Image (spheres, rainbow, N blue to C red):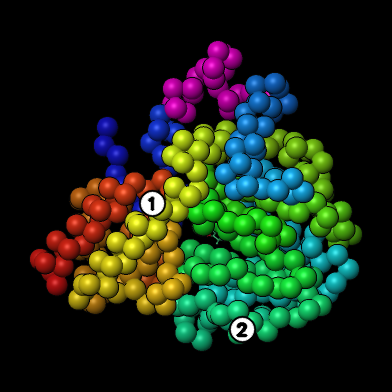
């Protein structure tokens, strides 16, 4: 069996140990005589799996008791609509920070439900930085402030948590959740599609403070009302059971490795050495302001775009795959989530140096 180093932005690499465990338990989950895929979501086996996963996630992120953790479907993109539906609570305006493709999509969707105030935009410099706190034109009457702590496509990560005063703060953490410890108390709501840094596609996590529930827009579909899921342990209808189980295995894997403080140490080291290699080279470049460079998604260009195709082909021949950048940005992108071993980053750096030596 040949496993490659997979730098895909999502769905992305999962820990080998997790996949092996899932394989071993595939046909018979712990003496149940069936696969987790075949279990009733209301049976005692799956209930145990679900509760363990939630407890482990709460422990990893130190989620306070007054927050609900929801295991949903629909992707982060469904949350772009669910957030205004649930959080406007009689108000008509919301603040958004525009820092890249995902912020733009969240803004476009929110505009269907309310007046969006773009409190800051990094579009003036092609989304290569995160606006500073003192540049935010915040509206004290906004129902909430939405931002994207890590922009997956542009490789831009906030180096601070915006202070919105009493206005609830909402974060799309799809590509950075679990990459380092965070202070959940600073947020009213955190959401993330699972397929970047949590588990397989099909699961969406929402962590929301209790007091924000129960005031959604009148026409909100039952499935988009957070209360529906919060009151029912995310079991109002059939949840994405197998993705939930696999995410639970990832949470166990993270705990065994020392939790998020340990992940932060490894992730910081992986990112620094890759950026250092890019900065030291004459062939590769990354345009993002140093303080805002993402730990998870590292875009870079080659000095001559003609070299893109041979770079990708030779990388693939060396077992380094999915390095092509997003079509909107071009060049390359190495996504180096929790599950990307440090050895994979080392292999990429060595390959990049060798490619530069022979083609630069
Ligand atoms: C991938 C991504 C999304 C979209 O997620 P889906 O689950 O595909 O809807 C939204 N926001 C960010 C920051 C992402 O990285």
Q: Which residue is mark 1?
A: 266
Position of residue 117 in the picture relative to residue 52 (left or right): right
Q: Position of residue 213 (x, y in %)?
A: 83, 54
Position of residue 308 in the picture relative to residue 42 (left or right): left
Q: Is residue 59 visible?
A: yes
Q: Position of residue 64 (x, y in %)?
A: 70, 48
Residue sitting at x 69%, y 57%:
185
Residue sitting at x 36%, y 60%:
271
Name which quarter of the figure residue 335 lies in. bottom left
Marks 1 and 2, how far apart at CA:
31 Å
Element under label 1? helix
The magenta region covers 21-40
Q: Image height check: is 18 above or below 173? A: above
Residue 134: assigned label: 2
Position of residue 80 in the picture relative to residue 36 (left or right): right
Name which quarter of the figure residue 121 lies in. bottom right
């Amino acid at each position: 069996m040949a496993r490659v180093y997979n730098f895909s932005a999502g769905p992305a690499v999962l820990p080998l140990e997790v996949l092996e465990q899932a394989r071993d338990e595939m046909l018979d989950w712990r003496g149940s005589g069936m696969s987790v895929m075949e279990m009733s979501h209301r049976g005692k086996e799956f209930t145990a799996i679900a509760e363990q996963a939630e407890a482990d996630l709460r422990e990893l992120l130190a989620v306070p008791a007054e927050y609900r953790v929801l295991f949903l479907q629909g992707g982060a993109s469904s949350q772009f609509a669910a957030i205004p539906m649930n959080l406007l609570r009689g108000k008509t305006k919301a603040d958004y920070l525009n820092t890249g493709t995902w912020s733009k999509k969240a803004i476009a969707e929110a505009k269907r439900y309310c007046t969006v105030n773009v409190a800051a935009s990094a579009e003036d410099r092609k989304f290569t930085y995160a606006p500073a706190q003192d540049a935010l034109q915040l509206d004290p009457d906004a129902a909430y402030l939405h931002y994207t702590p890590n922009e997956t496509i542009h490789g831009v990560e906030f180096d601070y948590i915006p202070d919105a005063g009493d206005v609830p703060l909402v974060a799309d953490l799809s590509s950075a959740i679990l990459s380092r410890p965070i202070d959940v108390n600073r947020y009213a709501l955190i959401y993330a599609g699972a397929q970047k840094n949590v588990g397989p596609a099909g699961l969406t996590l929402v962590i929301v403070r209790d007091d924000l529930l129960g005031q959604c827009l009148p026409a909100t579909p039952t499935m988009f009302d957070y209360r529906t899921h919060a009151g029912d342990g995310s079991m109002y209808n059939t949840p994405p059971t197998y993705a939930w189980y696999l995410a639970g295995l990832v949470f166990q894997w993270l705990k065994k490795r020392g939790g998020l403080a340990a992940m932060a140490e490894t992730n910081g080291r992986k990112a620094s050495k890759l950026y250092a290699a890019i900065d030291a080279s004459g062939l590769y470049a990354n345009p993002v302001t140093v303080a805002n460079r993402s730990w998870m998604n590292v875009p870079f260009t080659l000095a001559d775009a003609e070299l893109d195709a041979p770079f990708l082909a030779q990388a693939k021949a060396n077992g380094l795959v999915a390095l092509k950048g997003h079509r909107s940005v071009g060049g390359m992108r190495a996504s180096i989530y929790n599950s990307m071993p440090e050895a994979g980053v080392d292999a990429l750096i060595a390959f990049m140096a060798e490619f530069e030596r022979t083609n630069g």
